[in-house]
Amino acid sequence: MTTRTTEQWQAADAAHFLHPFTDFKALADKGSRIITRADNIYLWDSEGRKVLDAMSGLWCVNVGYGQRALVDAAARQMQELPFYNAFFQTATPPAIELAELLAEVTPPQFQHVFFSGSGSEGNDTVVRMVRRYWDLRGQPQRQVIISRKNAYHGSTMAGASLGGMAGMHAQGGLPIPGIVHIEQPYWWQHGRPKGLTRDEFGLVAAGWLEEKILELGADQVAAFIGEPVQGAGGVIIPPATYWPEIQRICDKYGVLVVSDEVICGFGRTGHWFGCETFGFRPDLMTFAKGVTSGYVPLGGVMVGDRVAKVLIEQGGEFAHGYTYSGHPVACAVALANIQLMQQLDLVTHVHDDVGPYLAQAYATLRDHPLVGDAESCGLMAALLLIKDKDQGTPFPEAVEIGMVCRGHCFREGLIMRAVGERMIIAPPLVITRSQIDEMMVLIRRCLDLTLADAQRQGWLA
Ligand SMILES: *Cc1c(COP(=O)(O)O)cnc(C)c1O
């Protein structure tokens, strides 16, 4: 890699690199921010500016940047055996050991894993596997998978179809057949206007699943998929009543439960997996991101006993897999990552220490004139920016209040993401209390700067 000035990087970037989820032309005009190195929870850009990364890269760098154990594991494995596949009745030690360790850290119904290269691919595997399962069970008409609006399940054809993002469905003729969506359990959108408490609303929102199952016919419904907490949708934390009721409904109609744990997995919510935080028992569990802390790409699906038994004992060949299923370098890094999490006792750190500390700090933000709501779950948190908090009046969409706030964060050295009027964070799990204090100072400063803009521009009138 060469050394270049920021302008040189930006010019070459604009000339050749089409970025994901990006308006290519707008970015080319503006120029990318070039990130050149990182350590712990901090990034540095090509101008030498230090940035507190409150998004863990993209929800993934759970153990923080610069962890030697992961780097060494990759280097060692690349020397020893950089690649071999798992197609032709072969396996490699890192893939076997990782499968074993995953069976240990996941809930007890999970004794088997199917590896992919990413979360999107993992969810493609889910669609194939769920439909295969019902074929083998002699109910091939059970094809439909129910998901939620504003869910994010990746960006492949199946992943984007499972997801509930209207903007993604509009490009490429999605969703694919056999995937339907119910409303999300977002109290602020659907519960508060009706005067429901959060817990009352959780039951109502879960009830939408039962309505959809009855409308379709239970004998048509293969599975329900959801993120324990919706991440990319804006850190939508469901009421505590929601998931147990979802589980009860799925049990009643024999519908498989799929937990997309790509963000919530590996400690993010204060347990190893989000389903443990929210009290449900999935049949399948998609993971990616935190499994390697993002150091190298890896994803997969944990396969619960109910499904694994059928696939193994009655399945014959499952005609599905990826070149990189069980990639030895990725698996070696995942092993080192999970072992490091165990050594540092990171899940307890989130559950007992920094999770509650962040929740307390966030609660104090509710006093801010722009903040309609501030909530967190483990180490993911959201702020709702609102025009009039007493009346519950939102800003007009045209104001793009989230983007205004994000602009200030960028300039002040903080990565916080805007999803509409929700400002969200998911910092590395290794963050300390004093680093949370430091982050809160930055967040408050950015809120104040956003408020000053709003006053100056007359947006509050
Ligand atoms: C990021 C994400 C995915 C997709 O993972 P990729 O590795 O980007 O394909 C799927 N589900 C959830 C919940 C995610 O956050």
Image: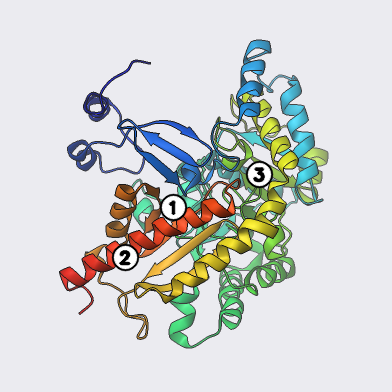
Label 1 crowd (10 A; few <14 / some 14-19 / many >=20): many
| Residue 316 can be seen, yes or no | no
Residue toward you, 19 or 132: 19
Tag 1 secondary structure = loop
Label 2 crowd (10 A; few <14 / some 14-19 / many >=20): some
Residue toward you, 407 or 218: 407
Quadrant of the rendering where the N terminus is positioned: top left
Relative height, residue 332 to residue 452 (above, below):
above
User: Disc 3 beta carbon < 8 A from ligand 1?
Assistant: no
* Residue 286 on image: x %, y %: 62, 46
User: Mark 3 = which residue?
Assistant: 129
Whole-Å distance between the Cαs marked 2 and 3? Answer: 49 Å
Res 448 label: 2
Quadrant of the rendering where the C terminus is positioned: bottom left
Relative height, residue 160 to residue 38 (above, below):
below
Whole-Å distance between the Cαs marked 1 and 2? Answer: 41 Å
